[in-house]
Structure formats: C-alpha cells, structure tokens
Amino acid sequence: MLKNFASSPEVQNLLDRLSGQDQLGGDARLKAIVRRIVGDLFATIDDFDITDDEFWAALNYASAGAGEYGLWAAGLGLEHYLDLRADAIDAANGVTGGTPRTIEGPLYVAGAPEAQGFARLDDGSEEGKGEVIVMHGQVRDVDGAPLAGAKVEVWHANTLGNYSYFDQTQSAFNLRRTIFTDSDGRYAFRSIMPVGYACPPAGSTEGILAAIGRHGNRPAHIHFFVSADDHRHLTTQINIDGDPYLHDDFAYATRDELIPPVNRVQGGGIGAKYGVEGPYAEIEFDFVMHPATAEAEEDASTRQRAAA
C-alpha cells in the first residue's frame, strides 16, 4: 500500500493549483477551505488505500442520494457538531443560560398560518387516534423579562411519524403554526401527540447508517424557531419523555434540558381553556432568549428550506 503519497511535493503542488492558490483572483478564504477539504480527502484515500471502484461507488451513491442531504447532515452528526461548536464559542465568551439550541432538521416549511397567543395545530383528522396535547409557556429574556410579540414557530410529525407538505395525504400546514406571544410573553397550542419515526426506508441515509451498524430512528419531538427583536434566533426542539429512543436519537438532538415533564390530566385545567374535553397531556416549557450582539444573529441560518 502506498503511504503518504498525499504529502508528496507533486500532490501538494496539485492542491495549490486546484484550489486556485496559484491565481490572483478568487476568494482567499474559500481557496484555503477547498484546499483543506480536498487535501483531507486525498489523505483519506491514501490512509485507507481506497480503490477507483470504491471512490466512484461513493460518488455515485452521493449523487443518487442528494435528496436526503438534510438527513445526512443530521445522521452523520454534522448538525450536532455545529451546535456543539456554537456552545463552545458561547462558553469561551462567557455566554451562559438561555434555552439550549439543537438541530433544525430538514422538515421546516415557511409560511405557516399565524395566530396570536394560542393556536390549534392539528386539523382534527387524527382526533381519537392520538393523545391530545396542550403545550404552553413563556418567552422571556435572560433577565426574566417577558418578551411580548415574540414569534414562536412550531412544527411536528403526526401519529404516523409524517410531516405535512412532505406527506401529501395531510392538509396544508397540518401541525404547523406561527404563534406570537401575548403581552406577558405567553404562548400556547393544542395538538395531537407526535410519535417517533425512522429515516425513509431504502433511502440513502438508511443505507449509510445500516452499512456502519447504526439505526435511523428518532424519538418523538416538537420543533421550534423562536425569535424576538434584538434577540438571538433560537433553533431548538423538545423531546417527549418516555420515548424508547429518547437517548438514542440517530440525529443526536436530545438534550436533558429539552425533555420537559409530561403531565397527564384527566380533564379540566388549562386544557378546558382551549376546548379540550376529557384527558390530555400537558407540557409547560419556557423559552429563554439571549440578546443579539449583531443583526445577523436575529435570523435563522441560510440553509435551503421548503416554502408552501
């Protein structure tokens, strides 16, 4: 097996040329990034003696699986790594407290209907098939002041583990809403308890995970974007306590601070306020927002997202 060929002068010269280092034009930062990425790939080919057939098989697989790259980012830990790195930067800068961030995933859809204070997320089609849930809480800053008019975007799967828009059998924006907090910074919604789900069967993500001996299951969870003027945009999700995959999430999104208790109520209480008759599950969860230090921090990342 050929060793350290990637470090040879010939290959180092090739890296300089392919990354544009020998040209005056172009972005210097991008040149350095391209050189590092391709150089690391060359070294990997060296270290594992990767054959032509193995290389092209991988490239063909990646091309065919492009539609699931959002799941690849989750399943291969790339999204979670970005969160860990952002946490480490916060820690180094002395930023503490606040609701923890965690991954967005690829299933957000822009344009969900808006509501003030409260919304019903489900369209009623699964009534009687799943547990009714009422979730409520407050959005406030790190000093405890409520944030009136904060924007809480929420989305989750149905009782079959499917998301509207991507699942054409569901009505438009089923289980998706944008809720603006009231004068006390409070939000609430009624919905149907989501279930966990797995990667698409026979998909490219499942294929990668199976090849390295991993499963592709996620615990039941509810996604959130939370934003408010002059505060950092928050991307997070809560997990439903008791799910068998709670601490074995293929996307590494579970955080202990994001597992609120689920209170089973036989009737009455806050559920009655929102038209729930009979038993329901209650989750109370507050979002605590950091002040923004730059305007760009107030917005979500620029990843490509669906829009209906």
Image: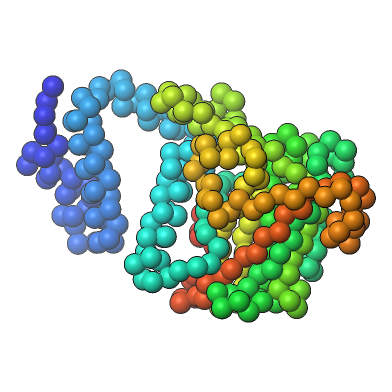
- Closer to the camera in the image, 192 or 51: 192
Q: Mark yes or no: residue 135 visible.
A: yes
Please, which residue is most extreme toward the left here?
A: 9
Residue at left offset 43%, top offset 32%: 62
Q: Is residue 226 left or right of residue 276?
A: left
Image coordinates of residue 80 in percent, x first then y, are: 45, 48
Label tally: 0
Image coordinates of residue 18 in percent, x first then y, are: 22, 46
Image coordinates of residue 134 in percent, x first then y, are: 79, 54
Q: Is residue 191 left or right of residue 199?
A: right
In the rendered image, which quarter contains the N terminus? top left
Residue at left offset 28%, top offset 53%: 33
Q: Is residue 89 left or right of residue 103?
A: left
Residue at left offset 19%, top offset 30%: 47
Residue at left offset 52%, top offset 50%: 255
Q: Mark yes or no: residue 191 visible.
A: no
- Closer to the camera in the image, 233 or 257: 257
Asked which quadrant contains residue 86, the reply is: bottom left
- Closer to the camera in the image, 77 or 166: 77
Image coordinates of residue 98 in percent, x first then y, are: 53, 67
| Color scheme of the displayed model | rainbow
